[in-house]
Image (cartoon, helix red, strand yellow):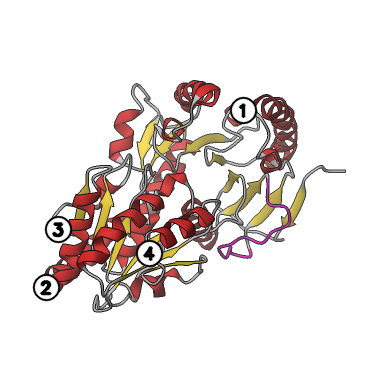
Amino acid sequence: MRAYRVLYSPLNLLSKMKIVYSILGTYNAGGMERVLANKANYLARMGYELTIVTTDQKARLPHFELDPLICQVDLAINYTDDEGLGIFKKMLSYKRRQRIHRERLEALLLPLKADIVISMFDHDVSFLHAVQDGSKKVLEIHFSRFKRLQYARKGLWKLVNTWRSAQDLVLARKYDRFVVLTHEDHTYWKGLKNSVVIPNANTFTVPARAALTEKRAIAVGRFDYQKGFDELIAIWKTIHARCPDWRLDIYGQGPLQGDMLVQIHALGLDGQIALHAPIKNIRDAYMHSSLVLMSSRYEGLPMTLLEAQACGLPMVAYACKCGPRDIIKPGKNGYLIAEGDRADFADKACRLMEKAKLRKQMGQNAWEMAENFDEERIMRQWLLLFERLTKGEQR
């Protein structure tokens, strides 16, 4: 009896190519899950045979709708069950789960005989490249080169993350192709001859840009350390003093929600900042906003900026590693702010709030520049990559 669970398996597929994606789960409302759903749905419509393999799905439905032709398989490894364990117990458990993960993934891949198997740089990254199933192996990263070093951990965990960051470079070399999201991040993966840049695509288009008349700013992301909403809430105290008739709506969920609510209350911003659960039709939230704010400490290629730009919103973001520099052209479609410069962040946001003409011009520029991330344009790059790999071309 198989140890993994087939969540959904379509019959009678007529395919061009078999492609497998491997990820922790599709139940989250994150940017990586949204990007995967969009790519997989696109490929399924094109006639490719798609399988998404997860490790921690636990019978939960995908947050983003998947084409019924996509086969979904969960291996029931459940790495997330170890959250909260001490470092030594976690390391022992992780080693056991890695062994089981490899056994179950190999049992799935060997008879499947896929053409391409793609790791989303999750728990399979250490061994997928060595699975001898005849497929080409692609490693796809959705965060920056220095993500592990930006957790701000100390002591033994800092040493572990430093070692793991070094190992990331070693592992990336072992794959047939390593895909990064931005040209900025590409420069940090030095010496890799198998790397290529393919950005995320827009998740939607709109027939006309947002009106930018509502006195509302929007921020979107998981409520965790990475997204830096503690920074944004602190910045909003300054913004509120200068532009008191504007409000901030933050969409997301995560472990720091309680801390964020406490901070909002402590700063006297209860009526000015609202936290909202993720919504599937986030486009409507952007369309009823007038600018997007991003305070992340690190990114891959931030989907919130791509989505906001597609709706014609001007952007203000910390120039973190990596991604904002590939999207925002300062003074044209938004502003890039030096990390930690709260005063400049507040000033640039207020400038857009106070000057409707500037806001609308930058919004128009953003809407036009969204074409750089058109889905057809981006997916052609993926299709060309798959074609070259299956034909044995080196680059």
What amino acid does circle 1 point to? Phe
Asked whether residue 36 is in view, the answer is no
What amino acid does circle 4 point to? Gly
Residue assigned mark 1: 127
Q: CA distance from mark 3 to mark 2?
A: 13 Å
Q: Earlier along the polypeptide chain: callout 3 or callout 4?
A: 4
Circle number at residue 268: 4
Which residue is located at x 13 percent, y 70 percent?
A: 355
Q: Earlier along the polypeptide chain: callout 2 or callout 1?
A: 1
Secondary structure mainly formed by the magenta segment: loop
- x, y percentage for residue 269? 37, 65
CB within 8 Å, label 2 to label 1: no
User: Is 292 in front, or is 117?
Assistant: 292
User: Is 302 in front, or is 195?
Assistant: 302
What amino acid does circle 3 point to? Lys
Indicate the secondary structure of the residue bearing disc 4. loop
Front tag of 4 and 1: 4
Which residue is located at x 15 percent, y 63 percent?
A: 351
Label 3 crowd bin: few (<14), some (14–19), many (20+), radius 10 Å: some
Q: CA distance from mark 3 to mark 1?
A: 44 Å
Indicate the secondary structure of the residue bearing disc 3. loop
Residue 164 lies in the magenta stretch: no
Indicate the secondary structure of the residue bearing disc 1. loop
Circle number at residue 357: 2
Quadrant (top left, top right, bottom left, bottom right) of the C terminus: top left
CB within 8 Å, label 3 to label 1: no
